[in-house]
Amino acid sequence: MIDRRRFIAGLGAGLGAGAAALTAPTGLWAQSGRFPLVMPPLLDATETGRIDLTAIAGKVRFGGGDESDTWGFNRPFLGPTLRVNNKGETAATVKNTLPEEVSVHWHGLIIPGDVDGGPHQPIAPGETWAPVLPVDQRPATLWYHSHIHGKTAPQVYKGLAGVMQLTDGLDKDRGLPTEYGVDDLTLVLQDRRFDSRGRMVYDPAMRDAMMGFSGNVLLVNGQYQPFTTVPRGIVRLRILNGSNARIYSLAMDDGRDLHLIGTDSGLLDRPMALKTVVVAPAERVELLVDFGTGGNATLVSAPEINSEGGGMMGGMNGGSGRPPIDQPVDPATAFPVLPFSVDESRPAFIDRLPDTLGGELASVTTPVDVTRHLTLDMRMGPSMMLGGGNRFSISGEPFDMGVINQSVKLGATERWLVTGQMLMHPFHVHGCAFQVVAENGGPVRPQNLGWKDTVLVNGDAEILVRFDRPAARDIPFMYHCHILEHEDGGMMGQFTVG
Ligand SMILES: [Cu+2]
């Protein structure tokens, strides 16, 4: 058994790959300075009950570089922010004008398998998919993205993703900021790799296949080097990690608190003051930041914690070889995510943190019917390095569209014990929200106390899930690692609920 440290050291030495550093590009292409952040356009379906998306090809000059070939929904790169009622039916259409199959998985929607948009629901070129989404869950910030098996990584990378807000229209009563793009900001964090001419490239080498593909530039909402101006007061950040593999460890550069108010699947009971918030691929966090004192500040991230480049590996004390997740962010090594400039003349609508939020901490109260053990396998040794066989699987079974890996009884409550090998793996389950009840046999990290649909597994995680939505054999639900290269490589399984 190769231990984790030797495995990662071997990758570095054997493949000659440098650290997955996220540095400013050195080419002449990159524009200097920063430009105002732009929100994705808001597609508000709360009145109409309709979402119309078209997957299109586009060309984008990121940061003044040469044109990149991109994909998006209704726009060249990424898609609109969809605002949808948290209860009731919303009718969607997704037209595919691209030259290959795509799908739209509504990540975090707790809906039946036949409208979930996974790999069994490809939309052929020229075709339109028209599901009706029967939504009935807590208000939350979700997202949507293509989910074609073997192509999720390149398709999401190219831009087939967007944010979805589930709303009950009561956030003002909760004392929460609600003005889209003013004091309620949507931030899609994605690292991308740019060549010397400023073109976005996706060319995974062996190391990328193993570690997941990481970039040399951070984009926020598809923008290179943005900044934003905010009113003086409380500002809400809805953050999606839409990256293929990179984990962000977020903090404010002046040490002010990030007040966690929501996790993947809903609001907490009250704001939780944290210094560091870790966001793994596919996870969402909602934060409040207090700009009431007026000073400018920058949201920063520590370097990647899931590779040898993160600086965590060297510093960890022996033993398990497992780096801790919640480390204080060192401003000296952090990179900027988004600088905030406070407009002193403009008071915010909200000037104090709400005491309560009307949400809740996750608590599955029904008795457990079934316990399942899942291991997120990474194949080690020479065959891995040579690329032979399946590198990735779950509990020894690489993903197979024709194999149902688990059968769950409708209405059952299950305990899933998930073990990740070698790296941290963000584990996502379709068609549910779950409670994280233990991490490595111990207490749950504070930011995992809310309802979740994705959990960063750093060793062992124990989750409790109640399955209330059906999925049949022909269109089952998925569970998988959300490092997209792992998922495409076979670290995925499928299950029925019935
Ligand atoms: Cu993984």
Image (cartoon, rainbow, N blue to C red):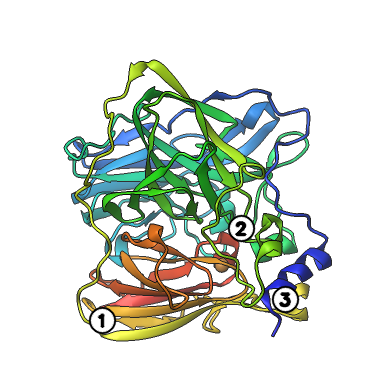
Q: Quadrant of residue 167?
A: top left
Q: Quadrant of residue 453?
A: bottom left
Seen at 60% across and 69% down, the residue is 423
- Under circle 1, the secondary element is loop
Residue under circle 3? 384
Give how far apart the Cα atoms at labels 1 and 3 are.
36 Å
Left or right: residue 317 versus residue 179 is right
Q: Amino acid at mark 2?
A: Ile
Residue under circle 1? 409
Residue 451 sits above or below residue 267 on the image: below
- Under circle 2, the secondary element is loop
Residue under circle 2? 305
Front-most of 230 and 99?
A: 230
Residue 374 sits above or below residue 431 on the image: below
Residue 477 is situated, as x and y percent measured from the top left of the image, at 37, 70
Q: Quadrant of the C terminus?
A: bottom left
